[in-house]
Every structure is written in structure tokens, then in C-alpha cells.
Amino acid sequence: MNKSLAADRLSLGTCYYPEHWDKILWREDLLRMLENGIETIRIAEFAWSKFELTEGIFTFDFFDEFLEVAKETGMKVIFGTPTATPPAWLTNKYPEVLNAAMDGVLYCHGARRHYNYNSKVYQELSKRVVEKIAKHYGPHPSIIGWQIDNELNCEKNEFYSESDTLAFREFLKNKYQTLKALNAAWGTTFWNQTYTAWEEIYVPRPTVSNATNPHEVLDYTRFISDSACRFAKMQSDIIRKYMKKGDFVTTNGLFSNLDNHRMTEESLDFIMYDSYPNFAYCLGTDPEHSTDLNDRKWSRNLTEVRGISPIFGIMEQQSGANGWNTAMEAPAPRPGQITLWTLQSVAHGADFVSYFRWRTCTMGTEIYWHGILDYSGRDNRRLREVKEIDRKMKKLSGAAGTAYEAAFGVIKDYDNIWDAQLDAWHERVDKLSQESIFKAAQLTHTPMDYIYLRENTTAEELIKYPVLFYPHAVIMTEQKVKLLERYVASGGCLVLGCRTGYKDETGKCVMLKLPGLLQPLAGVDVTEYSFVAPDDGRVYLDWEGTKVEAAVFNDLLQPLGENAKILGTYISNYYAGCPGLIENSFGKGRVYYFGGVFTEETAAVFLEKLNIANPYKDIMELPKECEIAVRSKAGRKFLFVLNYGKKPAAIELKQSLVNLYEGTKEVGRIEMEPYGTRVYELN
């Protein structure tokens, strides 16, 4: 079951690092935060040396003193475990804790996340410091929650140390039991890769032409995820022994090569996200001519988070310019953008938003990663905007705990995500379709969800979506087929794209007529297939009078069974006249198999023809520059309207709605300021 942040109102926080500042600033900083609507801080996630400056000698004086100030001022605290940055004494004495590059060369101390999850030494030292901290601070009245580590799998999401090789072998032994089974799963007869002893197996290493065994790399990615999940659970289990009733455990993400759903279910009460939409404006980008929606595309990331925790929190929300001394050059947020990005997070399900950071650091790699305050600490425009955000959040208190309303869903699963990372054919089709469906949903004002298929996913979870896209389900299993059959038979509409069902869960291609296990459900036989060649131009099909592009790759189709119907045929290339879109009735529902990759325009046609586009058009009319998101509960609907444009945007309210910021009713034409937001209530 997915977990959620149980909040009875919307609230603000910020990240604070007392170890960076003179103690005389602490009380002043906390009181200023409270005066401006910030009531929670996150601390300590990079402060291992403040607890264990030398090996085995623990002291708590520093954070005892700081937490006393927090208690006296009434500031609430989320306490971080410091395992993201092991101290110098540790990495110098125990170099086996360090991660390595693919060639085996160890990374050196001096940055962060330079450890590997599988070092026995690091596991024991991490257990010890977490146990000491949790036991000491668990009862503290100011602490309301705990953050595990920081951004698991950030910076590096591949691990090539000797410890990882040893752990990878154990992972494989547990999974396959015998080398015979492993060799069969990995197809090691190809290029004479057969293993005769477990000691012959390593994590992936550099090879001629950078060629890999894709089945090994798929299992290696599963192993990385397993390692991170086990590391998180180790810490969560310790914290839960000591934390107060009502406190929570979380961590901040999302990052790749990690089953975030498993980690959340095993270790967290909910997950938090770190949202930095300003990345869209880093030097070297061209936002004026961008086709990726710029900062608006962070709504896609927030949709991913919501697929894990329907109601969640933001641990790090953009509040200033971002940059390191070694990378990234981004402008300061323009007036209104902090509000826009905060409300973007809230619109998608966040009930708690914490800004990174309070003061801009004057030392280290992140000296250009600005917070709410600049180096001087004086009041500024960004602080005034945060205070105004707090006023608005209080007006929106009724939206806390409400759920996002989606008109349709996009199915994903980790096997296919990870396969697309290692398979260039899979990556090309999947990347375009995923981006295009999201863009089409945004620009047609059709809110969407991501739904991950997992072992415990039920048809009841799926059937609430009238339409589900599963664009390129390359890896398919019998369990997933049965689940999809139940969804469609119950009245659901499933949309599939080309390159579906041609691999098993090991990543090997199946010797079945395509789309493999899905052929009976789809009512389709893929008789031939090909990439669209550069000199083919753009390939189109005719969908009952509508011209639709079938980009990148084309499956040539034939209907199977009496319930399958040809809806569209190719009108260009050497296969003109061949079916490219087939609808199959199955139980109470239907399946559409589309023989191409979804472009933005093609996805928009599907949304329109399936009668799910722009579900709120009878309530309001919006320009493309604006996003609509709706959260609802118990008959109350909150309509968030976000203008991502640098120019004013006119919206048309077709019925009288309450502007919750001001408590007034509005109808007709409303002009929103650049980067403006509105939240309306519809009863």
C-alpha cells in the first residue's frame, strides 16, 4: 500500500546547517524563520564529525545545544542521519568503504556520497553512528521526523568496488542458486561467456567496444537497487526503535537504479522529493525556444513522486540560484517563480514544502547554491516572497490531505525502466513516448498519473483510470498480462505502442509471435517491424480520417480474432496500406495497439479520440502557458492554475469560483501576472 504524509494543513520548512554558522546566529535565524512562516527545519544530514570526530568517541554537545534553542523558540526539527558523507578518518583508515569507477579506481575523499553500500565496514560504522544518534535524540520533543542519509543514489548510481563484486555474487547465488541457472538466464553461450565458478563473476567492467551482456547489466541494476534498499532499511529499523510515537521516517529522492516503491514500503512512512525547476534555466539551455516545457516539466517528476506517496513532502524546494564552483550557472528565481514552484509542488500532492536553504553557504562546493537569504543575511525579495507564500498556504489549509485527480494514467515498471537504460533500441522509443505523452497531457490540460506495476498491484487500483497508456512494455511477464487482462475485462481502455512484449524478465527476446504474451489481449499479430530510416521522412497513418504520425519505429500489424478491428493504416513508406492501429474488444473493455512511437501531436490525438482530453473545459479555459491541477476530497475540489510564462496569461472562468487567496468570487476573463498562480475552490 502506498504511504502518505498525514498532514492536517499545509506548512513550510527550510534546510538549516547550524555547523556552518556562528552560534550567535542560531536564535535569530530560527525566530526570523518563524516570523516568515517557516516552522520546520531539517538538520544534521552532513554532520557525522559533529558526533564522531575520531573513531569510537561520540559527543552530542553541539546538537544538544542547538536543539535546546529549537525547543525554546518552538521550531520543529527533522533530523538527518549523516551517512551521506563519511568523515576523513573513516575513509583514510578503511579505503574499502569507497566507491570505485568502472575500471576499479577508487574515488577519493573530498565530495559526498563517495561510499559504497556493500562495504561490511561501512555498514557496521553506519549502524553504530545511527544507533548512537537515534538513541540519544529519539526522545527529543523538538524532533518530529527523521531523514535517512541524503539523496540515495544521487551523484553516483553505479558501484564497482570490490565489496560490490562480493555482494553481487551473493545476490546472484540467492537469486539463481546454481551457475547453470545463471548461465541460462544470462545467455552466456553467446561470445563464450559461460561461468564455471562464482568467483569468475564481477560487477560490469570495461570491455572492448564497451559491449555488455545486457542480461547481466539488468541483474546488476536490480542489485544496485537491492543494495540501496537494504541500506535504507538498516537505518530505518534502528530509528524506529527509539523515535517517539507520531514521528516519521523519510528520505529525499528520486534517483535512478532504485526501486523507490520498495524502499518506501520497507523503510519509510512517505518519501520526499527535492524539486529544482531552475535547472531548466542553467546556462547553455535555450528556454525561449525550448520544447521540453522548461520548469514546467518538473510536474512530471512530481507525478512520479505522487505515484509512490499520493500525498508527500518536499525536502528541498528551489529558493535561489543554483550552482557549484565546478558546475551549473543558473539565474536567481524571477519575482513570482518561488511561489510558482512551491504551488507546483502543492498542486501535485505536497502538503509540506521545505526550501533549500535558509542562508547561502559561504564555503565549500555549494557557495553558488543560493538559499532564501544571500551571504549577508539581510532581508530580501525572496524572503518577502516566502512570507507571502505562507499567507497563501494558510488560505489553502483545506486542501491538505486531498488527492490529485487524474484523467488517465501511464503505466511503468522498473524492469522496463532499467532495460531502457541498457538497450539503445528500447531507450529511443521509450524516451520519446514518455516525454510526448506528458507534454500532450500538459498542453491539452489533461492531468495524468503514473502507475507502477508491482507484485502487489491490483486490478482495482487500475480500474479507476478510464484509460491507461503502457507505451512500450518491452519486458512482459504472465503476471502482468493477467493483471492487464483483469483491468481491460472490467471495462478499462489500454493503449499499447510498438516494440511491446518481445522480451522476458531476463531481458532475452522471446521466440513468440509478437507482441508475445500480450497477443491474445491486444488482438494483434506483428508480422514485420523496422526503424523509420532517415530517408523515409515522416511516416503517417490514417486513423479514420485523421492523419497521425507513427514516429521512429513501425510495427506492421494484422488483426487477430473476431473482436479485432483495423482503425488505421499506414499511408506512407513501402508498407502503405498495411494496418498500423488496431482496436480489440476484450470483456467490457478495449485495447488499442499503435504500431509507432507517440509524438506529442499523436498523443494529443489519442487523448481527444478517447474522450479524456481537457476534462475541466466546462469550468475554465486556459492558454497553453498554464497548467491545471485538481486536488479533491469529500466533494471539495481545489483547482490550481499555474502560469509558467514570463508574460501575463488570460484565463476564462466559465462559472463563478472562489479565489482562495483573497476569499472572493471570480468569473469571466481573469488576467494572471507572469509566473502567477491561482487556487479556486469548486464545491
Image: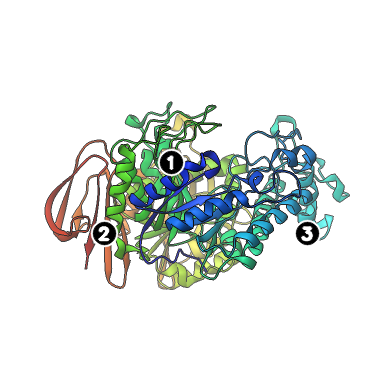
Numbered disc in front, either 3 or 2: 2
Q: Amino acid at mark 2?
A: Lys
| Residue sitting at x 22%, y 64% | 682
Choose the circle earlier in sequence order: 3 or 2.
3
Residue 43's spot in the image, x, y percent? 53, 49
Residue 252's spot in the image, x, y percent? 53, 51
Badge number at residue 479: none
Q: Circle 3 sits on which residue?
A: 176
Choose the circle earlier in sequence order: 1 or 3.
3
Picture quadrant of residue 132: bottom right
Way the structure is coloured: rainbow
Note whether 660 is above or below 25 in the view shown: below
Pick the front one: 505 or 302: 302
Q: At numbered mark 1, what does the secondary structure look like: helix, strand or loop?
A: loop
Q: Amino acid at mark 1?
A: Ala
Marks 1 and 3, how far apart at CA: 39 Å
| Residue sitting at x 44%, y 66% | 6
287 lies left or right of 252: left
Question: For mark 3, does the 10 Å Cα neighbourhood hold few (<14), some (14 to 19), or many (20 or more) residues?
Answer: some
Marks 1 and 2, how far apart at CA: 46 Å
Question: For mark 1, does the 10 Å Cα neighbourhood hold few (<14), some (14 to 19), or many (20 or more) residues?
Answer: many
Residue 85's spot in the image, x, y percent? 64, 43
Would you say the residues marked 3 and 2 are in contact, meaning their CB atoms lie under 8 Å apart?
A: no
Q: Amino acid at mark 3?
A: Tyr
Q: At numbered mark 3, what does the secondary structure look like: helix, strand or loop?
A: helix
248 lies left or right of 210: left
Q: Which of the image's four quarters has the C terminus?
A: bottom left
Pick the front one: 273 or 7: 7
Q: Residue furthest left?
A: 668
Badge number at residue 551: 1
Numbered disc in front, either 1 or 2: 2
Q: Circle 2 sits on which residue?
A: 395
